[in-house]
Image (spheres, rainbow, N blue to C red):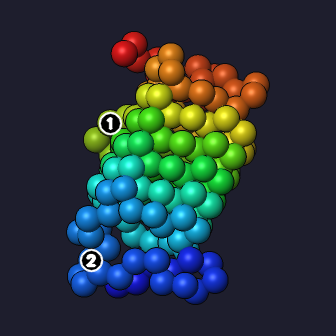
Amino acid sequence: MEIKNTAGRVLFTCDGELRNAGLDDVDLSGANLEGANLEGIIWMGVNLEDANLKSADLYWAVLFQADLSGADLESAQLQGADLKEVNLQNANLRNANFGRDNLGGSTQLQGANLTGADVLGANFDGAEYDERTQFPRSFDAQKHGMLLRKS
C-alpha cells in the first residue's frame, strides 16, 4: 500500500493494510487519502497538514496530537475518534461527522484547536471538549450539542 500526495509523490509505503501501519509521528503532509477506510487507525502525532481526507472513514481513529491544519475533512466520518490536542486550524470540516459512535461514545476534542476551521454543516452532537479547546469565531459549542468535560 502506498500513500501519495496530490502530486503523485510517494510519501509512505507499507505491506498489508494501512490501518496496521505504524505511522506515529510520520510526516504525511499533503497526503491524498480521499475516501480511505482508516477506521480504528492509531496514528498519534502524525503530520497530515494540508492532507486530502475528504469522505475518509476515521471512525474510532486515534489521532492524538496530530497536525491536521489545512486538511480537507469534508464529509469525513469521525465518530468516536480520539482527537485530543489535534491541530485542525483552517481545516475544511464541512459536513464532517464528529457525532456519537454506534455505542453512544463521544468524539474527544479536548485541547483541540479548530480556529479558522470551516464547520458549516458539521455534526458535533455529543462530542466532548474542555476549557483548552479552541473554536472558530462565533462557534457556540453548546448550541452544536457538544459536552464540556473538565480536565
N-terminal label among 2 and 1: 2
Question: Residue 136's quadrant in the figure?
Answer: top right
**Residue 95: x, y in percent?**
63, 51
Dot 2 lies on which element?
Answer: loop
Query: On the picture, is 108 further left or further right than 116?
Result: left
Rendered position, 77 above or below 106: below
Q: Image quadrant for the C terminus?
A: top left
**Residue beneath label 2, please?**
17
Q: Residue sitting at 64 percent across and 43 percent down?
A: 89
Most extreme residue toward the right is 138
Query: On the picture, is 73 further left or further right than 98?
Result: right
**Residue 8: x, y in percent?**
58, 86
**Residue beneath label 1, please?**
105
Q: Counting other residues with Cα less than 10 Å from the Cα at mark 2, is it few (<14), some (14-19), or many (20 or more)?
A: few
Q: CA distance from mark 2 to mark 1?
A: 26 Å
Question: Residue 88's quadrant in the figure?
Answer: top right
| Count of numbered badges drawn on the protein | 2
Q: Residue sitting at 29 percent across and 81 percent down?
A: 14
**Residue 84: x, y in percent?**
41, 36
Residue kind at label 2, given as amino acid type: Glu
Q: Residue sitting at 51 percent across and 21 percent down?
A: 132
Dot 1 lies on which element?
Answer: loop
- The numbered mark at residue 114 is none
- The answer to whether residue 93 is seen in the rendering is no
Foreground of the two, 136 or 28 = 28
- The answer to whether residue 113 is seen in the rendering is yes
Of discs 2 and 1, which sits in the foreground? 2
**Residue 26: x, y in percent?**
39, 62
Rendered position, 104 above or below 1: above
Q: Image quadrant for the N terminus?
A: bottom left
